[in-house]
């Protein structure tokens, strides 16, 4: 499985919060009214940013189950989330019905672009069998736009999107197709589905996040096309120069997907 540091998760959290599609969260929250207490499972929870966003937006009271493969991230989550939670170290590559048992809502943030078609289909089936609503957010959709533009932006984007589809531990990853494939899998499982865009818009005031993105994109592109290393690193240098000059803005396309039964 791919790993993410607590530092990276903290750096991206403000962008995640600003990007979320409130109409999707609101639709799911409305469908869950009357569930007391509301029981929520958060898959791949990291340090708990998804819970921090949702806790005040879902019906009260709530009981949360946070699952991640990284025990250190779960330990950090316990210090940062707004209430006591059940934390479980879990290998999400092999979905277990026990993780969904008794849940009214299953949620995940920035996870599903890492997983495979088979994983998504099993996920939808397990959620349906548990009678749980679904809220899966910040699924990368393949769109990136950098301002000012650069002659090699499109070439790097294409390489990054190809890298996104490589195996991240769950089988061939859906990458940019994750939101659409998830919506279809939930629909096929009997859910009423709502999908809205939840793009990151990262301005000059978030320079370090931009730097980390550019470096990550360049590394992914080089990994896939080592013969193009010189061209890719030159692109990276030009992009970072715009960041350092305070003239760079980046949009990264995501979508939020909600599903309710009945």
Image (spheres, rainbow, N blue to C red):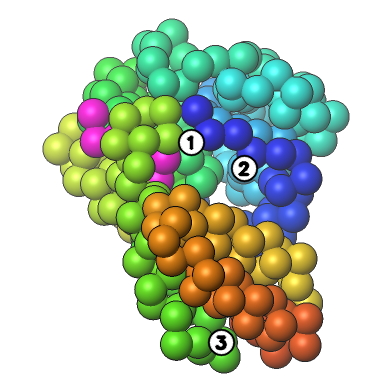
Q: Nearer the viewer, residue 227 or 244?
A: 227
Q: Residue at x 75, y 71 (%)?
A: 206
The reply to whether the C-beta atoms of the residues labelled 1 and 2 are less than 8 Å apart is yes
Residue under pointer 3 = 147
Q: Nearer the viewer, residue 199 or 192?
A: 199
Q: Of callouts 3 and 2, which one flags the residue occurring earlier in the amino acid sequence?
A: 2
Q: Are marks 3 and 2 in contact (CB under 8 Å)?
A: no
Residue 107 marker: 1
Residue 114 part of the magenta segment: yes
Q: Is residue 225 above or below residue 107?
A: below
Earlier in the chain: of badge 3 and badge 1, it is 1
Residue receiving disc 2 = 50
**Residue 186, picture quadrant:** top left
Magenta stretch in the rendered image: 112-118
Mark 3 Cα within 10 Å, few/some/many (few <14, many 20+)? some
Of circles 3 and 2, the one toward us is: 3
- Percent coordinates x, y for residue 183 in the rendering: 26, 47
Q: For residue 229, say whether it is visible.
A: yes
Image height of 125 relative to 52, above or below: above
Q: Earlier in the sequence, mark 1 or mark 2?
A: 2
Secondary structure, magenta segment, majority class: helix
Residue visible at 71% across and 83% down in the picture: 241
Whether residue 24 is visible here, answered yes or no, is no
Label 1 crowd bin: few (<14), some (14–19), many (20+), radius 10 Å: many
- Residue found farthest to the right: 79
Q: Position of residue 18 (x, y in %)?
A: 63, 65
In the rendered view, does 182 fall on the left or right side of 109? left
């Amino acid at each position: 499985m791919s790993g993410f540091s607590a530092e990276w998760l903290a750096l991206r959290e403000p962008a995640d919060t600003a990007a979320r599609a409130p109409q999707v969260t609101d639709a799911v929250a409305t469908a869950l009214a009357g569930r007391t207490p509301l029981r929520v499972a958060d898959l791949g929870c990291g340090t708990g940013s998804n819970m921090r966003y949702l806790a005040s937006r879902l019906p009260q009271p709530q009981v949360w189950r946070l699952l991640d493969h990284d025990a250190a991230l779960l330990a950090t989550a316990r210090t940062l989330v707004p209430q006591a939670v059940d934390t479980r170290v879990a290998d999400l590559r092999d979905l277990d019905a026990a993780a969904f048992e008794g849940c009214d809502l299953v949620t995940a943030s920035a996870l599903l672009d890492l997983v495979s078609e088979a994983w998504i289909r099993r996920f939808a089936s397990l959620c349906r069998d548990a009678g749980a609503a679904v809220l899966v957010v910040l699924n990368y959709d393949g769109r990136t736009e950098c301002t000012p533009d650069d002659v090699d932006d499109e070439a790097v984007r294409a390489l990054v999107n190809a890298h996104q589809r490589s195996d991240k531990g769950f089988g061939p990853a859906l990458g940019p197709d994750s939101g659409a494939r998830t919506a279809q899998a939930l629909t096929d499982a009997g859910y009423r589905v709502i999908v809205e865009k939840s793009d990151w818009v990262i301005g000059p005031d978030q320079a370090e996040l931009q730097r980390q993105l550019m470096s990550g994109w360049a590394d992914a592109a080089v990994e896939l096309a080592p013969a193009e290393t010189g061209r890719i690193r030159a692109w990276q240098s030009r992009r970072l120069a715009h960041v350092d000059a305070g003239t760079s803005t980046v949009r990264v396309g995501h979508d939020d997907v909600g599903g309710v039964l009945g």
